[in-house]
Image: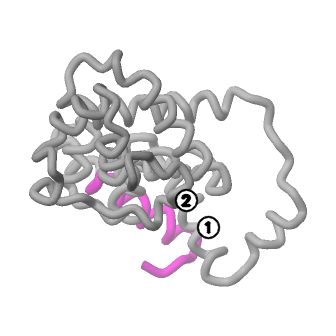
Amino acid sequence: MDGAVDWNMRIGHARTVDPAEAPYGNQDALVMAARNGDRDAFGRLYERFGGMVHGVLLARVPCSEVDDLVQDVFLSAFQRLSTLRAPGAFGAWLAAIARNRAVDYHRRQPVEPLADDIAAADDGPQAEARAVLGVIQSLPAAYRETLVLRLVEGMTGQEIADRTGLTPASVRVNLHRGMRQLREALDSNGRAR
């Protein structure tokens, strides 16, 4: 990355970094290096946690706003990294920043969608995916977040727990109950499983 964070990287292109692949060895070392100004280390944190932040936001705000808000979350985290007391809590801290950014988004004045955005929403499989995402977004917050992280971002239950600070048991319960509610909602809407 030439020592700089690529702030224009699209989350869909981010990849999960295997801890063995990282020159710093573990998350704590990456956080400490980033805290000391190492932009490459922060870029690796972005790669490792970008999907989680994307999923947390996708569970709470319109799809069209997510990419910009992901960038805002990471910029805010970069600027406030010195305030993080425990490097091992980076994922939970970052998830909290993302949740707060979503709350801030909903506090601002609503913006009317552009005509082009409305037309683009009616295009076949993407329209169906948006409809299913809308059903997920109508579920309780704990369920929608874990469902988006699992179904959209492709994270395992353990990855969700590791990155968000939730316990593995909580993630399992949230996924189980969330999937049940999602199936019921989709069945009541006439969609096949």
| Nearer to the camera, 77 or 24 | 24
The quadrant in which the N terminus is found is bottom left
Q: Quadrant of residue 34?
A: top left
Picture coordinates of residue 81, whole percent (x, y) = 36, 24
- At mark 1, the secondary structure is helix
* Majority SS type along the magenta span: helix
Q: Is residue 149 above or below residue 183?
A: above
Q: Quadrant of residue 191?
A: bottom right
Residue annotated with mark 1: 131
Residue annotated with mark 2: 135
Q: Residue sitting at 75 percent across and 75 percent down?
A: 122
The quadrant in which the C terminus is found is bottom left
From the viewer's perspective, tell me whether residue 128 is left or right of residue 85. Answer: right
Estimate how packed mark 1 is, as few (under 14), some (14 to 19) or many (20 or more) residues with alpha carbons within 10 Å. Answer: some
- At mark 2, the secondary structure is helix
Q: Residue sitting at 82 percent across and 65 percent down?
A: 118
Residue 9 badge: none
From the viewer's perspective, tell me whether residue 65 is left or right of residue 145. Answer: right
Kind of residue sitting beneath label 2: Val
Picture coordinates of residue 95, whole percent (x, y) = 38, 36
Please state the extent of the stretch shown in magenta in the rendering.
175-193
